């Protein structure tokens, strides 16, 4: 089977269920927002969370996708940077458990963490992210031999804030003939790096994943179908995820609207990352474009039924059964 290498921010999600938003107000975190915090604030928040009980889950956009491809059985690797600490060890252990060939470099800051607050009564999610060592990944860290033996390269858009790093990664991937995919990751990142991203997509990228707001920021079109067409003119395959309405995929003049797979959604966190895992797995298996989108939809439907980004074993089994049937795999 074809193999995949992911590069992204190595973050540990720290999930805490709160009875109200008083802690958010203490640290000036608007309900439902995603805020970056410095080390001092991050440590203060983490210390408070430890007292109320938390759940630790290895995360980060590209890492979530690579975890999915690994569980599908695709040989998978990951490059990131962590600190020499408890969270760095946890991140490594989680990837090892999923069968990922991790190349976790060590930074001189603490490991990155995304503190996720789930507040009553509507299960609103608020993020306070401390990138820490994850942000210390530099282009010089990417050695050519790290890319050898992989067929696909998947990069999260958050890394575009270090443009030299991003360019170095896609150059190494292209030199090796890898199929390169990029998840746009965040509309504000796209807005502030639009010209650079257009150059990268046009010259290096084969597959682009974007949601509606990211697609709009990248193309300037309000209509996601127009955005899809514009993106597809720059690369081989364009995917625009349209939330509860599913997704749209396009290659050349071939285009499909993918209906969302039936689910009982409670939390959309990680749905896009997991969709990418399913799509890339199917693509690497030689499936038609429509099937790739459908596989992405199936697995995304499983992650929205759980809190956080990790699908439980029964749902994974169910997804694999449904996907094997769709792909015509009988063994």
Image (spheres, rainbow, N blue to C red):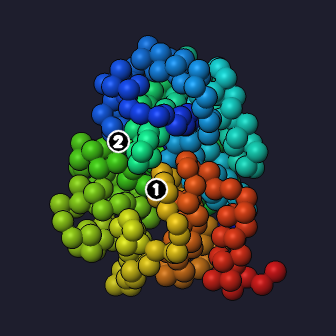
- For the point 42% across and 45% down, the residue is 121
Label number found at residue 88: none
**Which quarter shows the C terminus?**
bottom right
- Determine which residue is flagged by label 1: 268
Where's residue 85, x and y in %? 65, 20
Residue 168 is drawn in which quadrant?
top left
Residue 56 x %, y %: 62, 35
Q: Which residue was labeled with disc 2?
A: 32
Quarter of the picture holding the N terminus:
bottom right
Q: What element carries label 1?
A: loop
Residue at image position (33%, 37%) is 31
- The x and y percentages for residue 189 are 30, 44
Relative height, residue 314 to residue 86 (above, below): below
Q: Is 269 in front, or is 229?
A: 269
Q: Up-down: is 241 above or below 327?
A: above
219 left or right, relative to 210: left
**Can residue 168 be seen here?**
no
> Where does the image place residue 293, in percent across and percent down from the top left?
49, 74
**Location of residue 137 with respect to 71 vertically, above or below:** above
Q: Which residue is drawn at 47% across and 34% down?
A: 19
Q: Write the residue at 49% across / 24% down.
A: 132
Residue situated in front as seen by the camera: 108 or 244: 244
83 with respect to 22 (left or right) = right
Disc nearer the start of the sequence (1/2): 2
Is the residue marked by circle 1 packed among few (<14), some (14-19), or many (20+) residues within 10 Å?
Answer: some
In the image shown, does 60 or 201 lie closer to the viewer?
60
- The image quarter containing residue 238 is bottom left
Depth order, front residue of 304/40: 304
- Quarter occupied by residue 204: bottom left
Residue 119 in view (yes/no): yes
* Mark 1 in CB contact with mark 2 (< 8 angstroms): no
């Amino acid at each position: 089977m074809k193999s995949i290498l992911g590069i992204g921010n190595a973050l540990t999600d720290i999930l805490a269920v709160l009875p109200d938003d008083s802690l958010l107000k203490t640290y000036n975190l608007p309900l439902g927002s995603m805020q970056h915090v410095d080390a001092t604030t991050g440590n203060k928040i983490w210390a408070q969370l430890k007292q109320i009980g938390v759940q630790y889950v290895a995360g980060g956009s590209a890492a979530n996708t690579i975890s999915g491809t690994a569980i599908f059985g695709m040989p998978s690797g990951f490059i990131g940077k962590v600190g020499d600490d408890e969270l760095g060890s946890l991140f490594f252990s989680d990837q090892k458990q999923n069968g990922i060939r991790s190349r976790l470099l060590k930074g001189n800051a603490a490991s990155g963490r995304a503190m996720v607050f789930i507040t009553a009564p509507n299960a609103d999610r608020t993020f306070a992210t401390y990138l820490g060592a994850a942000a210390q990944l530099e282009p010089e860290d990417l050695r050519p031999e790290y890319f050898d033996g992989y067929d696909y390269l998947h990069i999260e858009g958050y890394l575009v804030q270090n443009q030299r790093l991003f360019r170095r990664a896609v150059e190494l991937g292209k030199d090796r003939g890898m199929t390169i995919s990029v998840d746009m990751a965040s509309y504000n990142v796209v807005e502030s790096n639009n010209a650079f991203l257009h150059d990268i997509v046009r010259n290096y990228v084969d597959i682009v994943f974007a949601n509606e707001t990211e697609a709009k920021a990248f193309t300037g079109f309000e209509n996601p179908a127009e955005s899809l067409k514009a993106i597809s003119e720059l690369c081989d395959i364009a995917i625009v995820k349209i939330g509860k309405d599913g997704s749209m995929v396009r290659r050349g003049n071939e285009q499909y609207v993918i209906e969302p797979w039936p689910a009982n959604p409670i939390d959309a966190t990680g749905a896009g990352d997991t969709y990418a895992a399913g799509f890339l797995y199917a693509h690497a298996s030689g499936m038609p474009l429509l099937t790739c989108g459908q596989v992405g939809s199936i697995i995304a439907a499983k992650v929205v039924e759980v809190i956080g980004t990790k699908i439980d074993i029964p749902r994974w089994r169910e997804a694999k059964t449904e996907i094997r049937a769709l792909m015509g795999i009988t063994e």
